[in-house]
Amino acid sequence: MITTASAPGKIILVGEHAVVYGQPAIAVPVWEVMAHALITDLPAGSGCTLIARDIALHTQLVDAPAELALALVTRLTLAHLGLPLDPDWQIEVHSTIPIASGLGSGAALSAALVRAIALHAGQTMTPAAVSELVFASERLYHGTPSGIDNTVIAYGMPVWFVKGQPPTTFTPRQPFTIALANSGIAAPTKETVGDVRQGWQAEPGLYEARFTAIGKLAWAARQAIEQGKIDQLGRLFDDNQALLAELGVSSPPLEKLIKAAKATGALGAKLSGGGRGGNIIALVQADTREAVKAALLVAGAKTVIVTTVGG
């Protein structure tokens, strides 16, 4: 028997970094990039093999170290479902989501894996259960994650997220379009999250004020999305970017991309995710999307994905 499952990438619209400190954030799935898991039955006694060709991984589950996220998720899911801990399966994962770019590559791979294991065993799992299992791997990737990546990827819908509270999915009043530009610079979220934490520990009052301001922008952004006021959302992107720069997570390459997007008609633009590298997002309209995309590529973007939220 062969079983497959998939999970989308994600972007954070507003609220990154502050979300780690209890402020709200909004994230949406990106279906133009996906992670996939494929499980094939093996002869009895073969044990479980893990394969991830993207990172040249080929190992038996029993030999995989505890810190290997794919092995961790596999073991946790098998235990959660009451399955043998070394089944005679070949598990192969693959992803079109760039690694260390703020698109949730690790969470998406884990989510696809969790779903494939459940399906292969003939069991069903709620999005909440998938999210909980994936969160365990997020601790390895990010150190002190907010939980937003695993949540939006598991639910596959726009998510209003506050750490420690049940996530809320919601639907935009009207679709809107985002140009997502990859800087080509690796952006390990664990590092930027750690640096922001050090700043917060050194100057808690200053950082708390910035986090609170970002939280207010997230509330305003949700209202704009639910009311269909997309021009307001663009201005909120710009305001959020200014605060992220104050947190020290922007960079000249990202600022160059943001400037190029704004100069060619984007309603607003900001970094998305951990920052310093990874992606920027620009809010575009039908008559500006191609010009913005072209300008981003000229400004140094390695790839540009155009995705519609709420379509």
Image: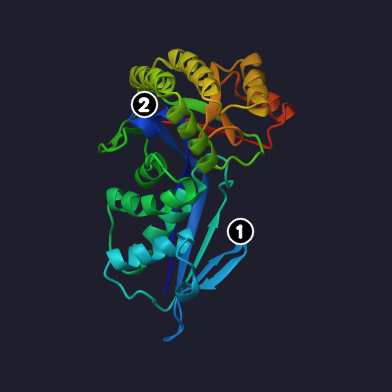
Q: Label 2 crowding class (10 Å Cα cut-off): few <14, some 14-19, many 20+?
A: some
Compared to 16, does 81 lie above or below? Answer: below
Q: Position of residue 192 (x, y in %)?
A: 53, 36
Q: Position of residue 266 (x, y in %)?
A: 58, 18
Applied colour scheme: rainbow
Say which label, 2 or 1, has the lower sequence index: 1
Mark carried by residue 172: 2
Q: Disc 2 vs disc 1: which is toward the camera?
A: 1
Label 2 amino acid? Pro
Q: To which quarter of the image does residue 206 belong?
A: top left
Residue furthest right as drawn: 298
Q: Position of residue 57 (x, y in %)?
A: 58, 66
Query: Could you say which is closer to the camera, residue 121 or residue 215?
Result: 215
Q: Label 1 crowding class (10 Å Cα cut-off): few <14, some 14-19, many 20+?
A: few
Query: Could you say which is closer to the camera, residue 170 or residue 193?
Result: 193
Q: To which quarter of the image does residue 171 belong?
A: top left
Disc 1 element? helix
Q: Residue at x 32, y 51 (%)?
A: 132
Label 1 amino acid? Asp
Disc 2 element? loop
Q: Quadrant of the C terminus?
A: top left
Instruction: Please state if 215 lies on the left or on the right of 35 as rendered.
Output: left
Instruction: Please state if 226 lies on the left or on the right of 192 as rendered.
Output: left
Q: Residue at x 43, y 86 (%)?
A: 45
Compared to 184, does 208 lie above or below? Answer: above
Mark carried by residue 44: none
Instruction: Please state if 98 lies on the left or on the right of 143 as rendered.
Output: right
Q: Can residue 166 be seen here?
A: yes
The residue carrying mark 1 is 54
Q: Real-space Cα distance between discs 2 and 1?
A: 35 Å
Q: Position of residue 279 (x, y in %)?
A: 58, 34
